[in-house]
Image (cartoon, rainbow, N blue to C red):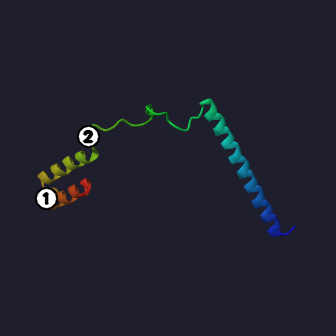
Amino acid sequence: MGLLAARAATRMGARQQYRTMARMQRRRTAFQDQRGMRQDFQPAGEEEVYEDAPAAPAQADYTVELERLAQLRDQGVITAEDFDAKKRQLLGL
């Protein structure tokens, strides 16, 4: 058997394996649909809760940054123009 024939056979085998796996997944999904066992969607009215998710901050991050920049401006560390430029950047203006 030549190189091209061997490569074609390998490709055909991989395709057949993919088709078999896809067919099995479709059957599994159909069976789970019939029994109400599917886990890949969230039923309506129920919120998904993540235990490892961090709590929402009390205030937005940009407000803390703006307060820090205002203090630096008031202390004379940065200029008013620098403060305004950074404020526009943070606010997306």
Q: What residue is shown with label 2? A: 59
Pick whichever, 49 or 33, lies toward us. 33
Element on which disc 1 rests: helix
**Up/down of 9 relative to 70, above or below:** below
Q: How many marks?
A: 2
Image position, residue 22 (x, y; %): 68, 47
What is the CA distance from the residue labelled 2 to the residue labelled 1? 24 Å
Task: Tell me residue 13's x, y (percent).
Answer: 77, 56
Residue at coordinates 26% horizontally, 56% vertically from top-left? 92
- What residue is drawn where x is 67% and y is 38%? 28
> In which quadrant of the rendered image does the C terminus lie?
bottom left
**Nearest the camera: 32 or 70?**
32
Which percent across, then down, holds residue 72? 17, 52
**Alpha-carbon neighbours of circle 2 within 10 Å: few (<14), some, or many (≥20)?**
few
> Looking at the image, which residue is at 77% across and 59% down?
12
Q: Is residue 15 above or below residue 56?
A: below
- Type of the residue with mark 2: Gln
Please state if 88 lies on the left or on the right of 33 as rendered: left
Which residue corresponds to mark 1?
80
User: Mark 2 falls on what kind of element?
Assistant: loop
Q: Residue at x 64, y 39 (%)?
A: 29
Under mark 1, the amino acid is Ala
Coordinates of residue 85 in the picture (x, y in percent): 20, 60
Bin the neighbour count of mark 1 within 10 Å (Cα to Cα): few under 14, some 14-19, many 20 and up: some
